[in-house]
């Protein structure tokens, strides 16, 4: 049985990566670990909801295909990714901001993800935003690695993320779905 995106993501994190994120956020490693534990499922659920929009799923497919084409795979360069986004000079670099890309894809779900992660972890909205920026390239790389093996289209992305969300909701009693439906309108 294939591993889930969540399992693959968490298997890539080591104590050094968590410590690096914790130092950058100015919190201890336990708080960072708890925040990561809340952020990744929330991001996956948010990406799944966003991928229901054909334009956003196609945009995610483009990014996944770009990661696929990157020699060596970005996932294989996890340490460098964390160093890039936790280094003080990263703020002034001309590198694309994966956090901004993620906010573009998540759209209205961004605030719900940030609020949910903040409530669970105790991090301020600013720190949650930084955390999401650190996690975004790694999460997208994990998704790309799981979908490797050819050109990915928006429909495949939507199906993969929907399946992942269903697995998480079965395991967590649909609590993730409720996180994104705070106004109880079914969206």
Image: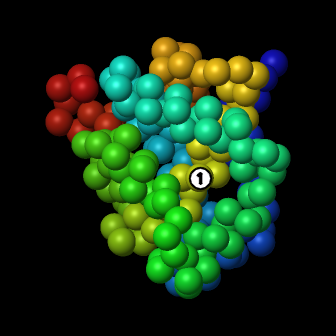
- Element type at marker 1? helix
Q: Quadrant of residue 51?
A: top left
Dividing the image into 4 quarters, which one contains the C terminus? top left
Q: Is residue 52 positioned above or below 50 on the image?
A: above
Name the foreground residue: 168 vs 172: 168
Is 32 positioned to the left or the right of 9 in the image? left
Counting from the top left corner in percent of width and height, residue 49 is at 38, 29
Q: Is residue 178 positioned above or below 19 on the image?
A: above
Residue in the image at 76% along x and 65% along y: 79
Is 8 positioned to the left or the right of 115 in the image? right
Disc 1: which residue: 137
Residue in the image at 27% along x and 34% along y: 181
Q: Is residue 168 visible?
A: yes
Q: Is residue 11 visible?
A: no
Number of residue marks: 1
Is 43 positioned to the left or the right of 124 in the image? right
Q: Is residue 147 positioned above or below 104 on the image?
A: above
Name the foreground residue: 29 vs 80: 80
Counting from the top left corner in percent of width and height, residue 34 is at 57, 61
What is the basis of the colouring in this image? rainbow
Residue in the image at 60% along x and 75% along y: 86
Counting from the top left corner in percent of width and height, residue 30 is at 63, 71
Dividing the image into 4 quarters, which one contains the N terminus? top right
Task: Rate crowding at label 1 as few (under 14), some (14 to 19) or many (20 or more) other CA atoms within 10 Å.
Answer: many
Residue in the image at 49% along x and 70% along y: 94
Name the foreground residue: 51 vs 115: 51
Counting from the top left corner in percent of width and height, residue 75 is at 74, 48
């Amino acid at each position: 049985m294939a591993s889930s995106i969540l399992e693959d993501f968490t298997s890539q994190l080591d104590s050094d990566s968590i410590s690096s994120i914790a130092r950058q956020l100015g919190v201890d490693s336990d708080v960072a670990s708890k925040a990561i534990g809340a952020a990744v499922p929330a991001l996956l659920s948010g990406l799944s909801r966003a991928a229901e929009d054909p334009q956003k799923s196609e945009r995610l497919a483009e990014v996944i295909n770009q990661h696929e084409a990157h020699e060596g795979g970005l996932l294989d360069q996890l340490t460098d990714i964390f160093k890039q986004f936790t280094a003080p000079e990263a703020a002034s670099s001309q590198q694309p901001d994966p956090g901004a890309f993620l906010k573009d894809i998540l759209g209205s779900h961004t605030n719900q993800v940030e609020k949910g992660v903040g409530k669970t972890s105790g991090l301020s909205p600013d720190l949650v935003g930084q955390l999401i920026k650190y996690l975004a390239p790694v999460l997208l790389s994990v998704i790309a690695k799981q979908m490797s093996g050819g050109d990915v289209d928006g429909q495949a992305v939507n199906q993969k993320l929907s399946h992942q969300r269903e697995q998480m909701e079965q395991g967590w009693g649909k609590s993730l779905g409720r996180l994104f439906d705070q106004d109880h309108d079914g969206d």
